Image (cartoon, coloured by chain):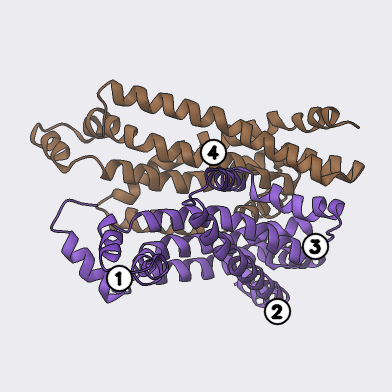
Chain colours: A purple, B brown
Amino acid sequence: MNLLRQWVDLFPALWPGLLVTVRLTLAAAVVGVPLGVVLAVAQTARSRAVRWGVVALVEVGRGAPALIVLYLAYYGLPQVGLALPSFTAASLALAVTTGAYTSEVFRAGLAAVPAGQREASAALGLSRGKEFRLVVLPQAVRTVVPPLVGWLVLLYQGTSLAFAVSTPELLSRAYNAASISYQFTAALTLAGLMYATLSLAALGLVRLPGRAPRAARRTSAATSAGPAA
Amino acid sequence: MDTLGVVGVIARGVPQTVAISVVSFLVGAVLAVPLGLARRSVQPLLRWPAGAVVEVVRAVPAVVWLFIVYYAIGSGAVQLSTFQAAVVGLGVISGAHLAEIYRAGLAAVPRGQVEAALALALPTWVRYRRVLGPQAVAVVVPPASTYAIGLLKDSAVASVIGATDIAFRAVQQTQQDLDGLTNFAVAGAFYLLLSVPVAVVARLVHRRLVRTGVTA
């Protein structure tokens, strides 16, 4: 088929773009996910000023379009003496958005750990650090993983916004290849296909039945007898 | 130009942002009806293709869809304006997302309601129109409004293909005065402000639906 041949011809031109896209996703995730943890934990701080400040930060981060945050990092930061190359600016902007969104995921994950678990830890005389590390965190991780992977897939797709600040990622490569050869349909659908393949593969892995850790299945079997959570 | 002047310039993008968001949402809300119903069909020939459409549409970034609609489809046999391309692209994406929301809403109606409708020998149309539909709507409103707010923000990607919305005006203004910090902060504030009425209306509608007895 003609389109198939065009895809094969265009693939080498798009491949380096996919690598940039993946690197952009990883860079944003490596900075953004820990930021999300910090923002989630900070929301449980004793100081009201800290709590409100963090909530405001999260709400603004989630309320403004990712594209605007991206423009702000790329066009705005040089004014305060921080002129970043487009890849760094895009990573930073996506990391901030990731932090704001994933903090909600982590907050929900921490809240989902039954209060009895914390009470039991206190009764056993565990320090607050140990309680968090040995009791709360392992249980929170389990509820957090599926929505977190869902977010990472959205982040992977969101890196296409970096086109707007001319990072040479997948969409930019596809657009450039299309401008040269005038094969817009072939180049753009191939880019779409490359985005879709990785997204669907990642989502498929999480949804795969029986992939949940054994402990998770045991708990869900035990709780399914009681009222639904 | 002073900050107030900048606010005025960027505000000129508000009608376009609102129009793209509202029309895309309406297109999606309509498209999602057959898609959502097909997803629930007992007929695999309906269910599987609908599922595939929903998954594939959601697996490709919005910007890429807009590029495909605008540069690949919209520059061939049919000529699409940036606004039309944005509405087609974002409308289809909304359709895929809302179809899942509708499906979840219908699935949330207790099984006994369907059985009762069947026991009363209500025709399929009446079963959906009078029994399932009204109960599903109350479940659908909160997630659909959350999606609408997300769509309002995502509509900023339409500026990348040149739709003259808030983000576009802010970029244009920045190219003139190089004051990105102010311009994009103002643009971000506009998006935040626009999402407030959506949230308020959604809450009112939901409360009304719950009060009139159409509860989940």
Give the farthest residue toward the left: B119
Classify B174 as above or below A162: above
Q: Nearer the viewer, residue B182 or A18?
A: B182
Classify B20 as above or below A138: above
- Residue under circle 1? A209
Q: CA distance from mark 3 to mark 2?
A: 16 Å
Q: Nearer the viewer, residue B190 or B128?
A: B190
Q: Are marks 2 and 1 in contact (CB under 8 Å)?
A: no
Q: Which chain is disc 1 placed on?
A: A
Tell me where residue A53 appears, x and y as whole percent. 59, 45
Element at label 4 = helix
Tell me where residue A129 appears, x and y as whole percent. 42, 68
First in sequence: mark 2 vs mark 1 = 2
- Residue under circle 2? A12
Question: Is residue A15 visible in the rendered structure shown here?
Answer: yes
Residue A135 sits in which quadrant? bottom left
Within 10 angstroms of label 2, few (less than 14), some, or many (20 or more) residues? few
Q: CA distance from mark 1 to mark 4?
A: 32 Å
Give the residue type at disc 1.
Pro
Q: CA distance from mark 2 to mark 1?
A: 35 Å
Report the residue at 28% width, 20% height from top.
Answer: B212
Within 10 angstroms of label 3, few (less than 14), some, or many (20 or more) residues? few
Q: Nearer the viewer, residue A174 or B12?
A: B12
Q: CA distance from mark 4 to mark 2?
A: 38 Å
- Residue under circle 4? B149
Q: Are marks 1 and 3 in contact (CB under 8 Å)?
A: no
Q: Which chain is disc 4 placed on?
A: B
Q: CA distance from mark 3 to mark 4?
A: 34 Å
Report the residue at 39% width, 69% height from top.
Answer: A206
Q: Which chain is disc 3 placed on?
A: A
Q: Nearer the viewer, residue A145 or A58?
A: A58
